[in-house]
Image (cartoon, grey):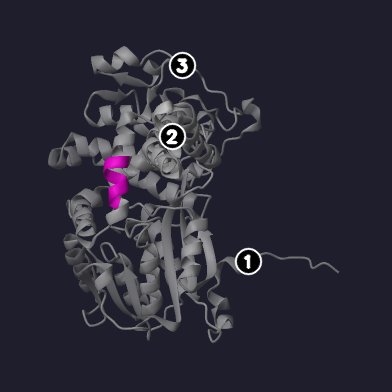
Amino acid sequence: MSSSVRVTNIPSIKNAPLVALAEGNGSFSNLTLAALVLGIPYFVKKWIPVVSWGGFYTYWTLVVLLGLPITVAYWTAMSIYGKRKNEKVELPGKDIEEYITLKDPALKIHYGGKEKIPMQVFHDAYFDGKAEFKGDVLDIMEQRHDWAKFTFTPELFKYVFTSLIPEVIVHSKSQDEEQVRDHYDRGDDFYEWFLGPRMVYTSGVVLDNSRTETLEELQDNKLALVCSKLDLQPTDRLLDVGCGWGTLAAFASKNYGCDVTGITLGKNQTAFGNNRIKENGVGHDKARILCMDYREIPGGPGHYTKIVSLEMAEHVGIRRYGAFLRQMYDMLDDNGTFVLQVAGIRPAWQYEDLIWGLFMNKYIFPGADASCSLGWVIKQVEAAGFEVKNIDVLGVHYSATIWRWYQNWISNKDKVIAKYGERWYRIWVFFLAYSTIISRQGSASVFQITMHKNLNAFHRIEGVPSHSSIHLSQKNFSPVV
């Protein structure tokens, strides 16, 4: 069965072994769930004498009361008993002890031999030192389908209903500020130990598949590509929303001479970014990083000729996504360009994708609930009044980037543990290893979208030179006659 699936040997990425190419369980139907949520209360009302006398309101009361337990039961059952998308890759079928060690006696009672452990149960145990990988974390995670199962556990449902859903609904300024600062103000050294000297926490871009470009090369490639898509000019006023440590702001102002304003909620990032700009010979009158919420960005309608936001919109939240894009529309000059880079998940998901996403939301990026599919993002963009000029899907580039972050992180293991403790090291090594795989296999991706206002008077022809995806590589072609 495995012969129809091939492996790669490309220097630019962490190539997957055959077992890592196995498909997971993706058995789920919204229509089936809807039928159960609406149908079961109908039969309950019809067959149980206590409620059979009620009418319309009784039925909908039952829908509300039974909807949650029905959903939980359906999701749990399908995550356990649903079939893999296909079985072209045969799993080795080894005992889980070949891959991991369970140190907690309570875990050993339930899991061992051929009885796989739920991924959520395992990673929580690993973070607490109650479980270990038998070898390199990334190498063992590549074989996860042979030792872990991707089932919904009580702990996952508890997190969804008590933390995730309330956060999605609220997404207040105070909540965003608390979550962002708790994450990004942990310490610049914590991030430098995996991001390296560029201090860029977004996907880089691979340009040469024939060699292993350095992390710095990937990030420089991305910075240059973004500036090219923006078609930056010395007269431009560029806004960088969610600017991180200010690397793009410094790069753009230094190389293109434009005025740049970067926005971040991170206090450490603000100080670091302004110092980085100064060290690159750019004056504060030309580029600056401001510590503020995106809802407080200075400048009136049409003030900025170019806007960029790299993997910040996920933190805006689903509820406020449309308002954020309309704000960007209002602040952008009618002849301006907006480059939005945003991470998202595939709509044809597998249960593994959701379990990974919940891990990310709980441990890595709290509040980043707007990591949605490309189709969803485009609908929001167009509804805000933009026209999409170009889309690049950079998931495999993200995998290449995170793989390099992973290598940096494990090389700095002793420093991390000495300052931040074993638990933080374990959470991040798991995050980086798993995300290298997730973005390579398409569970999650990153979309770089170039857009402008959809106005009749916008001169689209002037954007042809910066329309990167239509330009062919240098090659001699024989025309058809």
Image height check: is 180 above or below 1?
A: below
Residue at 26% x, 74% y is 297
Question: Image quarter for residue 90?
Answer: top right
Query: Where's residue 117, x and y in %?
Result: 37, 22
Q: How far apart are marks 3 and 1 (CA)?
A: 48 Å
Horizontal side, residue 90 vs residue 295: left or right: right
Q: Is residue 150 above or below residue 173?
A: above
Tag 3: amino acid:
Lys
Query: Which labelled disc corresponds to residue 94?
Result: 3
Residue 250: give x, y in percent of width and height.
29, 71
Identify the secondary structure beneath mark 2.
loop
At 42% from the left and 71% from the top, the residue drawn is 227
Residue 162 in the magenta stretch? The answer is yes
| Dot 3 crowding, Cα within 10 Å, few <14, some 14–19, many 20+ | few
Horizontal placement of 360 versus 13: left or right? Answer: left
Query: Label 1: how many residues lie within 10 Å, few (<14), some (14-19) or many (20+)?
Result: few
Mark 2 is surrounded, within 10 Å at the Cα level, by few (under 14), some (14 to 19) or many (20 or more) other residues, namely few
Q: Does the magenta stretch include residue 101?
A: no
Q: Which residue is drawn at 42% across and 78% down?
A: 232
Q: Main secondary structure of the magenta part?
A: helix
Q: Name the residue under label 2.
A: 53
Image quarter in which the C terminus is found: bottom right
Q: Measure how far apart labels 3 and 2 are at the Cα level.
A: 56 Å
SS category of the residue bearing label 3: loop
Amino acid at pointer 1:
Leu
Residue carrying label 1: 472
The image quarter in which residue 71 lies? top left
Residue at disc 1, secondary structure: loop
Foreground mark, 2 or 1?
2
- Asked if residue 280 can be seen in this view, the reply is no
